Image (cartoon, rainbow, N blue to C red):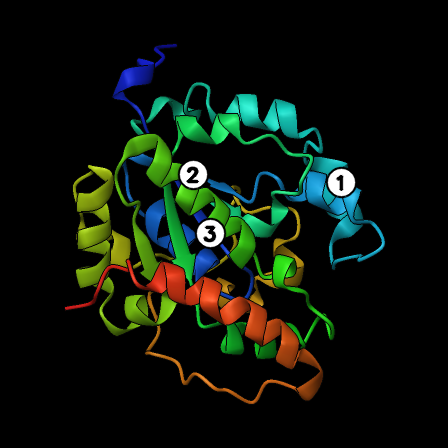
Amino acid sequence: MTVIAQAAVTRVAMWSGPRNLSTTLLRSWGARPDTSVTDEPLYAHYLRETADRRHPGYDETLAVHDADWRRVADWLTGPVPDDRPLWYQKHMAHHLLPQVGRDWVDGLTNCFLIRRPAAVLVSMTEFFPDPRPEDIGLPQQVELFERERRRTGKTPAVIDSCDVLRDPPGVLDKLCEHVGVPYTDAMLTWPPGLRETDGAWAPFWYKKVEQTTGFGPPRDEFDGVPDHLAAVLKACQPLYDRLAEHRIQPG
């Protein structure tokens, strides 16, 4: 088996929060013929360490996926599955618990997917009535964003899910240019259904995405955040604004 040289490989790590467009983007990158994709590789570790906040698919995930973040980090920075030149890694920023090291992240091309925190919080209450700022990943995203800027001297790519839905080819083209890979219209459509590359939690979380064959229309964003989450929104909004200032604009 031929292993592609490390220098010839691009590992795109998309750091997102929950209730975003992250799985749709996983489908988009997975539709590329030159790309291997990985679905939330740190989720098993996160679930094991936060067992008091059980998620749907908890048992199934821990039965199948590696919960040792060190082994996972070594794998994510090692040879690319299927010997392809591009490895797209869908990461949830809130899976970066304090005990998870950060140095391995420097071996990735780190990008950031954001969504207005008011919309995220309202969406999250369907599953978790009392989310905290760290549960939607914005503090971790800002931490990684600033780390990447200090390390590289450049501003990493930031995309907003609403911008992607308004202009999928335009935003994806600019994103690909930013990370140094060619854009292809293959990223705009894909067959419906689950994938072998989906995590063991997919049957519990991906029912809507399972039906998609492309990007949907722009969604209505809403601001009806429950009163008990007002303080959480107040803490999250400036973090979002800090990242959104640098986002790739549609059109």
Amino acid type, label 3: Val
The structure residue drawn at horizontal position 29% and vertical position 49%, both measured from the top left corner, is 157
The answer to whether residue 75 is seen in the rendering is yes
Q: Residue at x 33, y 65 (%)?
A: 214
The percent position of residue 221, horizontal first and vertical second, equals 43, 83
Quadrant of the image occupied by residue 46: top right
Q: Amino acid at mark 1?
A: Leu
The quarter of the picture where residue 171 lies is bottom left
Where does the C terminus fall, quadrant-wise? bottom left
Q: CA distance from mark 3 to mark 2?
A: 8 Å
Residue 142's disc number: 3
According to the picture, the residue beneath numbered tag 2 turns out to be 147
Q: Is residue 74 left or right of residue 24?
A: right
For the residues marked 3 and 1, what is the alpha-carbon distance in whole angstroms?
Answer: 28 Å
Q: In the image, what residue occupies the spot 68% across and 31% down?
A: 66
Q: Which residue is mark 1?
A: 62
